[in-house]
Every structure is written in C-alpha cells, then in structure tokens.
Image (cartoon, coloured by chain):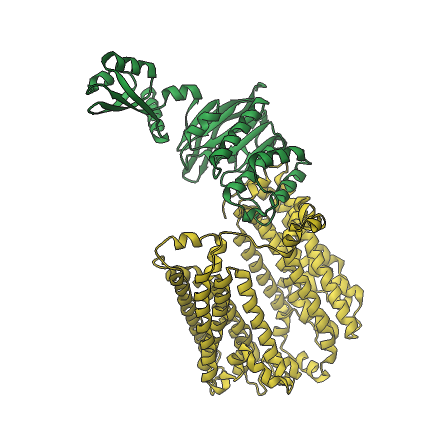
Chain colours: A yellow, B green
Amino acid sequence: MLGSVFAKTIRDRWLGWVIAVASLAALLLIAMAAYRTVDLGIYTSMPRVYRALLNIPGKADVGSLAISVLITTYGAMTMAAMALSMGGASIAGEERAGTIGLLLANPKSRIHVLLSKAASLVVLTALGVLALWGSILLASNVLSVSIEGMHPGALMLHLLASSLFYGSLAMAIGASTGNRGAAAGTAVSLMVVSFVAVGLLPLFDWGKNVVKALPWYYFNGSNPLINGVQWWHVAALLGASVVFVGAAVVGVQRRDLKGQSVGVTLFDRLRANPTMEKYIGKIIGSARVSSIWVKTASDYQGLLIIVAYYAILVQVILGPLYSAMPKAVLQAIAKLPQGLVALLGGGDISTAQGFFQIETFGLMGPILVMVVTVAIGASGLAGEESRRTMGLLLANPVSRARVLAEKSWTMIVYAFLVGLVTFAGVALGSVLGGLGISAWNIAATCVLQSLIGLAFGAFALALSAGTGNRKVAIYGAIGAGIAFHLLNAFGMRNDTLAAWAKLSPFYYYLGSDPLSNGMNWGHAAVLAAISVVLIGAAFPLFQRRDIHQRG
Amino acid sequence: MDDQTAIRTEGLTKYYGKVHALEDLSLEISVGEVFGFLGPNGAGKTTMIRTMMDEIRPTKGRASILGMDTHEKSVEIRRHIGYLPGDLALYPNLTGKDILTYFANLRRGVDWSYVEALRARLDVDLSQKVGNLSSGNRQKVGLIQAFMSKPKALIMDEPSSGLDPLIQRELQKMMREAADEGCTVFLSSHTLSEVQRVADRVGIIRHGHLITVEAVSTLRSKAMRRVELELNATADPRVFEAVPGVSDVDVENHRVSMSFGGDMGALLKAASEHYAVIDISSQEADLEEIFLTYYRDEKVTA
C-alpha cells in the first residue's frame, strides 16, 4: 500500500471511513428497530420548526423516517466531514507534519501529489457512500422495513456529490493557504450553516429562494429519497467540486510551502506587541506555566470552552422550547416505548424534570463531562509520553506521584466546572421557560453529573497510568461508558435485570431521580468512591512502570 | 561510597523482552569529571541515561548519582542535576521563555540573570513558540534548561545534535567550565572527535556492553588512524609491517598508507631510517574501526 501517493493516502485514511460508515450503519439499524415500535404520529405532530430541523417528512413511515433522520442529517454531515478532513489535509496536513519537503524531494510535482490526493478522496468517498447504500438495503431487509417507492440510490448519488463538494472546497483552501484548520473550519462552517438554513429558511416565504444559494439545498432540497435524482443539482455540486480542485491546483502551484509549525493565535499576535506584552504575557505566559496542574488546565482550556458553550447554549434553548411544545405532543412522546426512553436516560417527559432528564442529563450531560475528563485522564499522562515530553518534565525535582496528583486535580476541577456551567444553563433555561424546577435539585443533579463523568475520567487516568497508551485509555473509558450505560438502561426496563443495574455507575447517577427528589448523598458517595479508588490505583500503576519514549 | 564518586552504576542491566538493551554495565565517574559515553546508534546509550534518570527501571543492578540511589531518591537527585534528553521534544505551543518558566517553577526558581547569560551565549530567541524554531534552536532551549539551575551533575544525551560548529564549540566550553566548578558532566555521543575535545574519560558501549573505559589520552594513542606517508623512494611494505600497531599496509609508488594504532614516534623513526619523509597525513579512524580494535583486544584478553 505504499506504491504511490494515492495508495498511501488510501492506507492512511481507510480505517476512519470504515469506522464512520459502520457507526452510521449501526445507528440506522437501531433507529429502524426503534421506530418500528413507536407510534409515528408523534413525529408528524411535532412543531414544524423541529420537524424541519430534524428532516422529518410530513408523511412518515418507518423507513423514510429512519433514513431521513439519520442519513440526511448525521449521515450526510459525517460523510462530508470525513471528506473535508481529507481534503483540507491533502497538502496542508503534510506541511504541518513537516513531511511535505521529503515527499516533494521525490520526482513528483506538487500537482501530481495534489491530484493523487484528490483521486483518493473521490475513491474513498465513493466507496463509503456505496457501503452506506448497502447498509440501508441490508437494514431494511433484516428488519423487514419497507422502502418501496423510495430511491436510496438517488439519495446516495446526491450524498456523494455533496461530500465531494465539501471535500474539494477544503482541499482548495488547504492547498492555497497551507492552513489545515482554516480549510476544515471554513468548510464545516459552510456545511453547518447551510444545513440549518436549508432546514429553517423555507418556513418563511422570503427564504424559499435564498436557500438556493446554499450547497445543502442541492443535496437534499429536492428530497431525492422520495423524488429520485435531480440531475442538475448533482451536476451543480460536482461542477463546483471540479472548479475547487482546479483552484487547489492553481493555489498550490503559486505559493511557498510551509515547514513544520504551530499555529499563531490571536494572543500570540497581541503578545508580540510591546505595549500589550506585559498584560497578555500574564494571561498566556508565566501564569499558565506556574505549576503542572495550571499548565494542564491551560492545555485543555479550549476544550472546556467549547463544551461549556455547548452546555449553556443548548440548555438555555431547551427551557423555552419545552414550554412552547403543545401538550398533545408531550403526551404522545410520553408514550414512547420504555426501552427507548431508558436508552435516553429515562424520565417522564410529561414533566419538565423528565424532559430535562431525557434531553440534557440522560446522555448529553455525562458525555459533556466525559469529553473533558477522559481527554485529560488519557492524554494528561500518556499524551506527555507520546509527545516525548514526559522525560523532560520528570527531569525536574517532581515525583511521578506529584505529576499524577496535579493532573488528577485539573481533571477534578474541570469535571465540576462542566457541572457548574450545565447548572447555569439549566437553571437559566428553567427560569426562561417558567418551568420552576428547584435550583437545589438542578445543582444536585449537576454534582452527580460531574461525578459520573469524573468516574470515567478516573478510569481513563488509571488506564493511562498503567499502560502509557493514550488510545487504550480513551477507548477503554468510552467502551466502559457505553457498556455500563446499556447495563443500566436494560436494568431500568427489565425487572430481572434491575439488580444488575446497580453494578453500573449510571444507576447512582440518575437512579434516584435527583431532578425531582434532590440529592441522594449515598449515591453521590458511591460515585465519588469509584473515582477515589481508580485515581488511587493509578498511583502505584504509574510508579512501577517504565516511561515510554514514543507513542 | 566516597565523596569523590558522582555517578556509579553496578551491573546495570535492562532487557526489553528478548532485546538486551544493557548488559551488566558498571561504571564509576568522579566529581568534576567530564565523561563521554560513546557508541553507535542503538548501542544502549539512551537506555543507560533513561535508567539513570529513573524513567525506566533496570532489570538487574543499580545506579547512584551524588551518592543517592537513582530509584529511591530520584526526586532529590533531580533537584541537583540538569538533564537533556536525546531527540528532544518540547511543548510546541509554548515559547522558550514559557518552558523555562515552567521548569523554573517546578524547581522553585532559578537565577534569571544566569538564564539570560546562557541565552546570549547560545544566541537563541526565547520569545518564539518552540514549535516554530529550527531543531538547532530548540536544542538550545533544551540546553539552557539543563544548565539553568547550576546543577551538580549534567546528564546530556547527544547534546550537540543539530547545533552548528560554532555553537558546538561554545557548548564544549560551557561543559568544561561547569566541570571546572565541580559539576560532573555525563554526555553521550556518537562522534569520537567531539568527545575527545571535551571529555576526561570515555566509555565505549556497543550492543549494550561496555567495551572499555579509557582516559582520552590513552584512547588517542591507542586509536586507529589511517596514516599516509610520502617518501623519496618506492616504499617497501616490510619496513612498516615490522612496526608494532601497523596493519593493512598499502603501497603505491612513493606513497604508503596503513592503519596504525600505536606510538607515532616509533613509526616515524622506522620510516626515517630508510627514507626521507616528504609529507605525512594522519586521519582519525572512524568509530567502527575503533570498536573493531577493542573487539580484537577483547577477544585476545578473553
């Protein structure tokens, strides 16, 4: 697989595509299975805004609903994201890694490299779309869900054209600027904005024509699943892609290639200014390297900000959204099968508490904390080893135990910070929506949310301390999270499994319905004890082994 | 343990599964000594250094620095030593100043005027993010970091990698100065000439075995060189083959070249007895040739 630039790119990228498509296929299977057991009336009676955003067709049956909700939203965005990450990295990625010079030391032109990368992008995207098509046919067959009268092939052709559009756009920007972040960022922004706009703008009369300027319209605006291929839409997307590749060719020929480098941030520019230096230096300079835990905190500050922003924004929107939902819809949703509700974290959606339990705390809350805690737990130790900085850090008179203790401290502080912003968001949402949930109960739930996220972060930390392998730590913690979540979800649904659910940390998270009943200190103590034991176990594990020099 | 020994290893052994990275390595280095640790790539130099730093733990044997066990007292030891890892990696998103501040904080402060002096000597810009520095300039930041706490011992893994010759010379001066003030310097290298210029003694390692420890002066006299003489007449190889330490004699008209590892006086005497010597050139043997010499010796003594 190292015969050419084309083959090597395929070799570097195929696994990501396989994982993406396999995950989508699994989600599609679950969605179809779930929708089969649901009274679909509730979806069609949802508010128009909600339906437009989720791409729910007016007349829904199981197949079209599952495909619409999954493939034309998550699926299409996932495939486009895979393509644009490849496209953006095609030249700029090699520049950042510092390998472009070596690659071009061979008798191959820049254009040859670029076109090889473009070819691998087209081939992998096409294979990914084909596999997804296969999974639609397979899922509908296995579950005997009728897709008669639908055109999944047409949808897939639109999907291919759309993914190539974003991929080649990112390629043009990356090749012309050498900035992979700008390439992926621009393409993702265009994708998300146009996705939301195409969902919402047609609700207004003036918006119906505006959306025609947006790329997402040419993907799903004609509803190819129901209406078949809209050839000129496909042609428009592919034509634009060809233009982008052309722009990439011109762009990469004209500019200077960059060596290995790190990005320059706004702060860095300010710091370069002598009058600002004193102040900015305090923020991003000496202050952030004052100790190991502060430096760790500074390293993960960006991640925390993204998570916090998301937590607050969504919660603030959810409160008013709940109070705006018609009662009939809520009652209908309340009739969702118990299994599905349990998977979403359980809760009675006819009450505001239950709604937040499903929408916020059931899944999203623990995930938000875990994103931060698992990242710190896994990368805090193993990351310093794979980046080969651990040896230098430990050349200072600090013990391994202290390094571990300070990294754990950052993880604990950040877990509770995520809990705090979730509290702020939910409390504000509750006030804005006039839902009247007790602030104490929200606080109690957020503490439990921090604790459950911390437990899995502590698990990642212990794995990281024991193995020095970041991937083992991340996948181990995520795997444990999913397994215990399912154990708890099935336990809630099934009396014979109820006893087993108590083995899952998730039972001690929402099992006592803290949003309605307030804090269960016993459960909080169990969750805290799990973290204490796991972090405690990390110390001897880390103490005993050899430090790795390479990832 | 006497006060004069700064670094001591006893039977240090490290196995990675079936790979024997270090085999029964015993060494003693005195206070104020510059010790060069010489070996080709993959000989076990870095493994040795990482074991001394308690980054990895020996399969057998033990080591002590400044009289303290490298495992039991590792934190206390690190208070007194400066370390430069091989294949240096720094935090790319921090500036040189940030990194030095970070480590200074972990050491409860350093003398910043000394840091500035080091910076000026090595000529590096500390306000740049290290991810944007060239590898030589990154190495300089690593060097400042190792020297800045005025350590009692310096342990450096291939410290001159990536440095230009001028800075290499400056670094050699810095090492000598540190040693003159009582600092023990342990440096690994794969170039004999560098080690010869700065070290008092040299240990040679190959395939995890310590082959020999020699004073630099001994090594120099023993070391194989390629000697070429230009004579006033066609040379007779037998004249030279009779001199102890000569091998591989090659005659080409008036020119004779040979591998030589012995007393240069004896060779010149033998030559001038038979010929007039018009020109002489002596080239340092490469490392591999020296290893071969010592291997031959090892086999002979074994």
- Relative vertical location of residue A141 with respect to residue B130 in this rendering, above or below: below
Tell me how many marks there are. 0
The image quadrant of residue A348 is: bottom right
At x 62%, y 82%, the residue is A201
- Relative vertical location of residue A231 with respect to residue B261 in this rendering, above or below: below
- Relative vertical location of residue A197 with respect to residue A496 in this rendering, above or below: below
Q: Could you say which is closer to the camera, residue B65 or residue A7?
A: A7
Residue A335 coordinates in the image, percent (x, y)? 66, 80
Q: Is residue B209 visible?
A: no
At x 62%, y 59%, the residue is A371
**In the drawing, does residue B8 fall left or right of residue A43?**
left
Residue A484 coordinates in the image, percent (x, y)? 60, 61
Q: Is residue B230 visible?
A: yes
The image quadrant of residue A34 is: bottom right
- Relative vertical location of residue A430 with respect to residue A409 in this rendering, above or below: below
Residue B179 coordinates in the image, percent (x, y)? 56, 24
Name the image quarter holding the N terminus of chain B. top right
Q: Could you say which is closer to the camera, residue A248 or residue A386?
A: A248
Name the image quarter holding the C terminus of chain B. top left
**In the drawing, does residue A82 fall left or right of residue B105?**
left
Residue A405 coordinates in the image, percent (x, y)? 66, 45
At x 36%, y 28%, the residue is B291
